[in-house]
Amino acid sequence: MQVELDRSDLRILDLVQEHGDVSAADVAERLGMTASTCWRRMSRLQELGVIRKRVALLDREKVGLNVMVFSRVKLVGHGRDALLRFEQAVREHPEILECYTMMGETDFLLRIVCRDIKAYEAFFLDHLSRFPGVQSVNSSIALAVIKETTTLPLAATPAASSNTSSR
């Protein structure tokens, strides 16, 4: 469900998604709002689930996770139970950072991080290839990261171009 956001909400979100540790008082100061108004808006955005979580983003290579793999997985069956069993197996492995259900020839797309190629090979042989219902796995290793962001393009949202007044 889409949440109705005005320009002030979007300005807050732009700042918070770039600087997750910024306080409501700092956001208010940077955006020219009162601290109480900003705090209420940020609380509302959290309650509505627009701000899901504020986290620290780590450099995976600096913590020794040097290999990033994208795996396209095809299942034998596509019944609800088969999908749920596969999804549960995915949730049990922290090496899998992201998992998407896909439309087309691939059923799932996974983003996996490992120490090195040998660690991925072990993960594949010991776990991924044994997940329930797996028919095939086609993996590609990322050679370089060209663009990697968690910042959503809020300027492209309808509220960014509307004349909605601030609350």
Image (cartoon, helix red, strand yellow):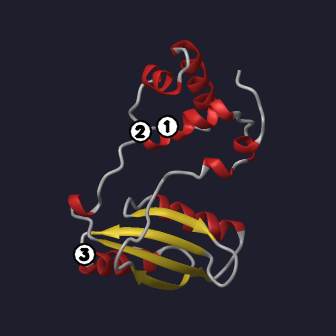
Disc 3 residue type (three-letter): Asp
Quarter of the image for residue 42 reads top right
Residue at numbered disc 3: 116
Residue at numbered disc 2: 19
Say which residue appears at 47% left-offset and 78% top-offset. Answer: 71
The quarter of the image holding the C terminus is top right
Q: CA distance from mark 1 to mark 3?
A: 35 Å
The quarter of the image holding the N terminus is top right
Say which residue appears at 48% left-offset and 58% top-offset. Answer: 91
Q: Is residue 10 left or right of residue 3?
A: left
- Mark nearest the camera among 2 and 3 is 2
Residue at numbered disc 1: 15
Q: Look at the numbered discs 2 and 3 and tell me whether their residues touch, using CB distance below 8 Å.
A: no
Say which residue appears at 41% left-offset and 39% top-offset. Answer: 19
Name which of mark 1 and mark 3 comes first in the sequence. 1
Expressed as whole percent of the image width and height from the top left, the position of residue 100 reads 58, 66
- Mark nearest the camera among 1 and 3 is 1
